[in-house]
Image (tube, rainbow, N blue to C red):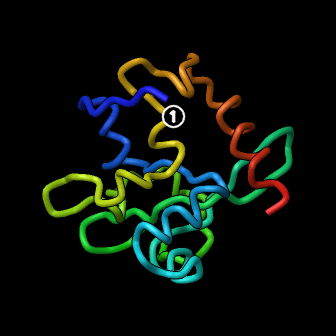
Amino acid sequence: METCSCKECVSACFNDPGRLVPDDILKLSQFLGISVNDLKENYLVRVPVTSNGHTAYALAPAKKKGQRFIANPGTVAPDYYAEEKGRCIFLDDRDMCSVHEAKPFECGAYMGCRNSFLGKPYRAKTVEEYFYKRWKSK
């Protein structure tokens, strides 16, 4: 998967961090040296993903506005969460990704400068369906 760190691609880190796929959970917890439960309770929120009127919940990094979380880690994000811009919990004090080697799937799949997801034109419905399929049974 091709990646980019231009201003457009990195902007998501300051607005709406990328969602994980189930395979990311163990990889990210091992990278951080914490348990899966600690990862879920202290760093991630559950965000809705929908397809054909059905909803599942994906995991995504919690995001902050100033010093407060928009939704506390370990909780289900409120309805307004996706619209609320916020800084990814994994950004360090130099605005660098502290988990880059184990970053969430969507962070690597999305390229803002090309408006693409997995190398194809970005279509919100298609991206939602992609995450719904991966989380519907979790």
Q: Residues within 10 Å of mark 1 (few under 14, many from 20)?
A: some
**Residue 16's x, y, as percent?**
43, 49
Task: Work out whether residue 1 or residue 16 is closer to the camera in this orientation and state it.
Answer: 1
Q: Where does the image place residue 89, in percent across and percent down from the top left?
A: 35, 65
Please determine whether, in this image, residue 67 is positioned above or below residue 134: below
Residue 111 occupies quadrant: top left
> 124 above or below 90?
above
Answer left or right for 86 relative to 18. Answer: left
**Residue drawn where x is 55% and y is 68% of the image:** 45
Q: Looking at the picture, tell me which residue is in the foreground, 98 or 15.
A: 98
Going by the numbered disc 1, the residue's amino acid type is: Ala
* Total number of numbered discs in the rendering: 1
Q: Is residue 41 left or right of residue 131?
A: left
Residue identifier under label 1: 109
State the image coordinates of residue 115 (x, y, percent, origin top left).
Answer: 46, 21
Report the front residue among 134 and 54. 134
Horizontal and vertical percent for residue 36? 58, 77
Instruction: Quadrant for the C terminus, please.
Output: bottom right
Q: Residue furthest left?
A: 94
Q: Is residue 89 above or below residue 52?
A: below
Mark 1 secondary-structure assignment:
helix
* Residue for point 40% across, 27% down: 112
Is residue 20 shown left or right of residue 85? right
Which residue is drawn at the image coordinates 50% and 71% (left, top)? Answer: 29
| Residue ID at (62%, 30%) | 124
